[in-house]
Image (cartoon, coloured by chain):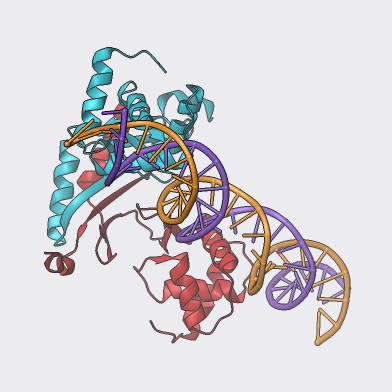
Chain colours: A red, B cyan, C purple, D orange
Amino acid sequence: MSNKTTTKDVSLEIKEIQESGLRVTEPRKKILHIFESNEDQHFTADMIYSELKKQGENVGFATVYRVLTQFEEAGLLVRHNFDSGHAVFELKKKCHHDHLVCISCGKIIEFLDDSIEARQCKVAKDAGFEVTSHSLTIFGYCSECRGNTK
Amino acid sequence: MSNKTTTKDVSLEIKEIQESGLRVTEPRKKILHIFESNEDQHFTADMIYSELKKQGENVGFATVYRVLTQFEEAGLLVRHNFDSGHAVFELKKKCHHDHLVCISCGKIIEFLDDSIEARQCKVAKDAGFEVTSHSLTIFGYCSECRGNTK
DNA sequence: CCGATTATAAAAATAGTTATCATTATTAAT
DNA sequence: ATTAATAATGATAACTATTTTTATAATCGG
């Protein structure tokens, strides 16, 4: 995980926090930076906490959870619950997508299938539902783990 | 919720528990009976606990959780985690299905769409995944709640 | 019906997360 | 830049859903 930061990156992060209506604080900058410098990766609160500690930061668990929740409310992050009992966060993308989760190594792969999306809308409509969101998660063994579990 | 039980029902429940390799005990019979007499309904551990209390049974929370987990392991029940933070259980059907969840009243509707199922397999295969399970949940407002939220 | 085994209820423990609170940091207005 | 008002922080306690522990009680093969 890289700690290198260009001036551009930092100012962008500050702007994003400001535009969310949140004060620009060290924990918030640091946490957002972890997500921005590791795009497409998914983090638990615990992973963020550990990463901050590793970087020598003095942050509390409460702050991590608070900031993650605030970022989610501000639309910067998206929270997923999968089946693990602990929430997973990722940078909010412009476009919706679903997940493939490896139950062996925890790897998460994103995908989007237009045909599935379209059918979902139809199913909901047929049932009289007004859809607010949907989540599709496929669990299994990724290509790397398939061999090891035999 | 009906408390009526035919002799046939009860003996069937006993048989199911026995065939799972579990001893036939009062809590297990009572819990399985709640599911069998309310087909297609989904229960949390808390709902089962409350129902048992309502029926005048003296059961502990731990027993409810233990039995639900054992029934899941035995293949009698299926556990879902949706996004609520607490597990939901339902009788295991012969066939897989997905869920529409009303975020207003909590109603759960089951559905199955062959086209979605097929695409899921393809997506996983393309990513090199060996699928073990998948869960698709559509959240929204059901037909009854749509009017009330305006 | 007896004895070995397993299940139970109650209580304590645990994991993940959220609330409380005294202190510190941020920001808008000087 | 300083200050005053406000909000954020870290530490800790509390909380929710669930699991483990333990001493007692129920089950079932013989």
Left or right, residue A141 beside residue D12: left
Residue A142 in which image quadrant = bottom left
Residue A28 in which image quadrant = bottom right
Q: Nearer the viewer, residue D7 or A47?
A: A47
Name the residue rendered at 26%, 25% in the picture: B13
| Location of the N terminus of chain A (image quadrant) | bottom left
Name the residue rendered at 29%, 12% in the picture: B6
Residue A39 seen from this side: yes
Q: Nearer the viewer, residue A126 or B37?
A: B37
Name the residue rendered at 24%, 63% in the picture: A104
Q: Nearer the viewer, residue C30 or B120?
A: B120
Left or right, residue B135 beside residue B2: left
Q: Position of residue A103 (x, y in %)?
A: 26, 60
B48 in relation to B137, above or below: above
Q: Position of residue B74 (x, y in %)?
A: 24, 41
| Location of the C terminus of chain A (image quadrant) | bottom left
Name the residue rendered at 58%, 62% in the picture: A66
Q: Position of residue A36 (x, y in %)?
A: 43, 73
